[in-house]
Image (cartoon, helix red, strand yellow):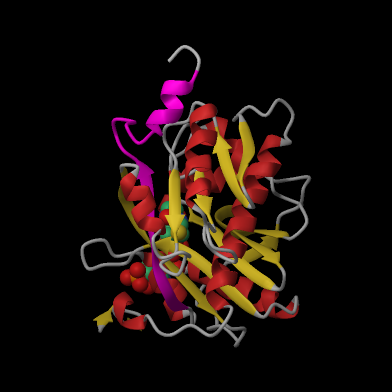
Amino acid sequence: MRSTGRQTVRDSRALESDLPTGVADSCELVEAAAWTDVVQAVSEQPGNTLGAHLGHAGVVPLPMVSALDYGPFNRVVGLGTGQAATEGQVDEIIHVYDGAGLSRYVISLSPLARPTELPDWFSARRFARGATVAKLWRDLAPPLEPTTDLRIELVTKSDPEAWARIQRAAWGMPAAMTAWFTAAVGREGWLHYLGFVGSTPVAAAAMYVSNGVGWLGFGATAPSYRHLGHHSGLISRRIRDAADLGCSMLVSETGEDSPRTPNPTFHNLVRHGFQLAYHKQDYTPGPDGEHRLRRDRDARPGS
Ligand SMILES: CC(C)(COP(=O)(O)OP(=O)(O)OC[C@H]1O[C@@H](n2cnc3c(N)ncnc32)[C@H](O)[C@@H]1OP(=O)(O)O)[C@@H](O)C(=O)NCCC(=O)NCCS
């Protein structure tokens, strides 16, 4: 056990437990749906300045943000969930990203993805293991009462910029990324939240609801307003709203929590009744780009 000074958070590994039927699939599918919808929304913006588009390998969407060629945005979620992946699908993923000229992308694999050989298929193609990610879920029991007097408002389509400003400040991103954050505001399934201290926007978050499952994401607090419970307050609000919307469960994903890299998001989610479902493993193409399918590359004109 570890004391945070407010409430005790147990070691993350100790939280892993057998998952009720269907929870693991829902965890992956809602994440894939949320991520896919953001990329779709960005691609539909006038001029598509970030070069967003969606490819497919079978039923699995392949999000691409060409202007960035940055792994965390070109992130494949849900492979081997719902229906077992095939080795052909793995090759297809490589083909599609290669074809789009993207060398940095991430396959975010659930430990329950099928078949069990799936990680080996990526290793055989010289993919490297990347980050470990914690997937958490919870039922709709009432949340902790917020300990902050943050005033929380829903963001409307007519005014998404303040929400985007908080996101950019929290993540240290340039103005060019505004489109990434504003695109999904007002779309079906999405709720965007902005927290104010007085009249100053200081914290932001979003929830995406699909098939009765709520996905919590985009938690962000402006650097000078951190450690005041604002993120915690936004979690609490989203749990309440999900219950009002009739959701059956909530899902979130964040970096692994460890003594060396303590993760406040993980702590807050656990404090609010989320349980660790499992740790996911990211796979990334080898640094030298030598993961490619040799026979296919050799067959390509001009190569
Ligand atoms: C992660 C992030 C959203 C947290 O926001 P925050 O508003 O500071 O979060 P909270 O204040 O609710 O909690 C953060 C810590 O402050 C502590 N805290 C909360 N209220 C407090 C108070 N009144 N006094 C002292 N500490 C307090 C919490 O216990 C927590 O500490 P812990 O990790 O040791 O448990 C923020 O750091 C951020 O925007 N980071 C960059 C973007 C990011 O990583 N987003 C999450 C993606 S998964």
Region of the chain picked out in magenta, as a range? 275-300
Confirm whether the magenta stretch covers residue 299.
Answer: yes
User: Residue drawn at (29%, 34%), measured in percent from left and top?
Assistant: 287
User: Residue 128: where, in percent of width, then height?
Assistant: 30, 46
User: Is 232 left, or right, of 56 in this rendering?
Assistant: left
User: Residue 225: where, in percent of width, then height?
Assistant: 45, 57
Residue at the extreme left: 260
User: Residue drawn at (53%, 48%), measured in percent from left and top?
Assistant: 89
Q: In the displayed structure, would residue 237 be above or below residue 128?
A: below
User: Residue 199: where, in percent of width, then height?
Assistant: 63, 55
Quick one: quadrant of the N terminus?
A: bottom left
Q: Viewer-proximal residue, 266 or 169?
A: 266
Residue at the extreme bottom: 141
User: Residue drawn at (56%, 37%), measured in percent from left and top?
Assistant: 64
Residue 12 visible, this orientation:
yes
Q: Viewer-proximal residue, 101 or 67?
A: 101
Quadrant containing ligand 1 = bottom left
User: Is 167 left, or right, of 279 in this rendering?
Assistant: right
Q: In the displayed structure, would residue 162 be above or below residue 109?
A: above
